[in-house]
Image (spheres, coloured by chain):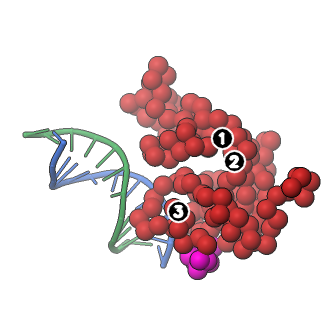
Chain colours: A red, B green, C blue
DNA sequence: GCCAACGTTGGC
DNA sequence: GCCAACGTTGGC
């Protein structure tokens, strides 16, 4: 999941109440559908800093809720206001995201050099989605590059 | 600031 | 349903 660090960095996530933030403001149907259909509580999230001097993976997080209605779409004062949406027929959803840990920055250039990551959706030419799927293999490869255990130390197996 | 890529809009 | 125009994304 991409986030502009000027909006919400990995440090902001770590310092948020409950270390959890609502992923409000997604206004792209594909990204919305990933949250609605493919993401479930407990799923791992690679937290990616975008539109900044050092784009790349900055930490690990997890999905903390099912998708639910993004209230900002009804707020005319919000930058995420969507006049074509209505509470009776809401258009936009979001999940909550919970902090797991900060990592060293795995920057975009290094991601592109890793053979195991060449297929990552986020690295494909022209990709602009702020939320893209990560395969089990890609997740494991990222953890290996970062020299992190693939499971928490207190997790069996 | 540039620009390629892509999504959305709206006239027809 | 087509497609040109426009807006946005996001690395560089």
- Left or right of A121? Residue A153 is right
Question: Residue A111, percent across and down?
Answer: 60, 74
Above or below, A77 against A129 in this view is above
Q: Are marks 2 and 1 in contact (CB under 8 Å)?
A: yes
Q: Which mark is residue A122?
A: 3
- Is residue A24 visible in this depiction of the protein? no
- Left or right of C8? Residue A71 is right
Residue most toward the right? A154
- Which image quarter: residue A11? bottom right
Residue at (67% x, 53% y) in the render: A45
Residue in the foreground of this view, choosing between A58 and A118: A118
Label 2 element class = loop
Using a 10 Å C-alpha cutoff, classify the residue at mark 2 as few (fewer than 14 neighbours), some (14 to 19) or many (20 or more). few
Above or below, A85 against A150 in this view is above
Above or below, A73 against A112 in this view is above
Q: CA distance from mark 1 to mark 3?
A: 20 Å
Q: Earlier in the sequence, mark 2 or mark 3?
A: 2
- The residue tagged 1 is A40
Residue A113 is a magenta residue: yes
Q: Which mark is residue A43?
A: 2
Residue at (63% x, 64% y) in the render: A138
Image quadrant containing the N terminus of chain A: bottom right
Q: Are marks 1 and 3 in contact (CB under 8 Å)?
A: no
Marker count (numbered): 3
Question: Residue A121, percent across and down?
Answer: 51, 62
Chain name for mark 1: A
Write the start and end of the magenta stretch as one range.
Answer: A107-115
Question: Residue A26, percent across and down?
Answer: 52, 44
Residue in the foreground of this view, choosing between A80 and B7: B7
Q: CA distance from mark 2 to mark 3?
A: 17 Å
Using a 10 Å C-alpha cutoff, classify the residue at mark 3 as few (fewer than 14 neighbours), some (14 to 19) or many (20 or more). many
């Amino acid at each position: 999941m991409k986030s502009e660090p000027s909006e919400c960095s990995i440090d902001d996530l770590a310092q948020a109440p409950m270390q959890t933030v609502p992923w409000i403001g997604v206004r792209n149907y594909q990204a919305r559908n990933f949250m609605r259909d493919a993401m479930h509580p407990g799923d791992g999230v690679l937290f990616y800093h975008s539109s900044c001097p050092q784009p790349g993976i900055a930490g690990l997080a997890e999905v903390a809720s099912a998708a639910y209605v993004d209230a900002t779409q009804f707020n005319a004062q919000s930058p995420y206001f969507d006049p074509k949406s209505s509470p009776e027929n809401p258009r936009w959803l979001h999940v909550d995201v919970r902090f797991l840990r900060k990592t060293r920055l795995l920057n975009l250039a290094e991601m592109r050099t890793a053979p195991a990551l060449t297929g990552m959706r986020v690295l494909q030419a022209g990709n602009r989605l702020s939320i893209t799927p990560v395969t089990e293999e890609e997740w494991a490869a990222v953890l290996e590059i970062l020299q992190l255990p693939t499971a928490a130390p207190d997790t069996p197996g």
